[in-house]
Amino acid sequence: MRLEDGTGLKVVEAVRDARPEARVIMLTGYGNIATAVAAVKSGAIDYLSKPADADDVARALLAVGDESPPPPENPMSADRVRWEHIQRVYELCGHNVSETARRLNMHRRTLQRILAKRAPR
């Protein structure tokens, strides 16, 4: 989604304009519903959040026609998705706990407890 010189949505549109038969998948670490809808409207056939399994990418690319691919067999748990998001924001904030807590709108001590635990499965 986020590129140094723009957004991945512009890339999806450019690929669809240049090669209408191309099958484009949006793969992002910044997944949310609004950008998923925007990506599909721009021409992406699927929208996957990182970390994505290679099998999920292959299923999306090999889906027949406009048929959507089947859901992943082993999707991440909601706890794991939350943990991944917290880790991503923590990295983007330069491992600053106070800044991360502010951006996530959570108490700093709560965030410290979450960061001290192991990743959920």
Image (spheres, helix red, strand yellow):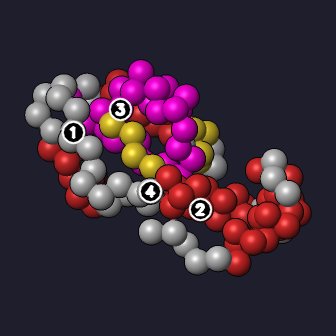
Check the picture and name the quadrant holding the N terminus. top right
User: How many residues crowd around disc 4 within 10 Å: few (fewer than 14), some, or many (20 or more)?
Assistant: few
User: How many residues crowd around disc 1 within 10 Å: few (fewer than 14), some, or many (20 or more)?
Assistant: some
* Residue 104 highlighted magenta (yes or no): no
Q: Give the CA distance from mark 3 to mark 1.
A: 13 Å
Q: Earlier in the sequence, mark 1 or mark 2?
A: 1
Q: What element carries label 3?
A: loop
Residue 27 position, x and y percent, is: 42, 48
The image shows residue 45, relative to residue 92, as above or below, that is above
Magenta residues, start to end: 21-45
Q: Give the CA distance from mark 3 to mark 2.
A: 27 Å
Q: Do the residues labelled 1 and 2 touch (CB within 8 Å)?
A: no
Determine which residue is flagged by label 2: 83
**Residue at image coords 79%, 63%:** 110
Between 34 and 1, the residue placed more toward the observer is: 34
Determine which residue is flagged by label 3: 44
- Closer to us: mark 3 or mark 2? 2
Between 10 and 33, the residue placed more toward the observer is: 33
Q: Give the CA distance from mark 2 to mark 4.
A: 10 Å
Q: Which amino acid does label 3 sit on?
A: Ala
Residue 89 position, x and y percent, is: 70, 58
Residue 77: give its label: 4
Tell me: 29 left or right of 67. Answer: right
Q: Which amino acid does label 4 sit on?
A: Ser
Residue 69: give its label: 1
Q: Which amino acid does label 1 sit on?
A: Pro
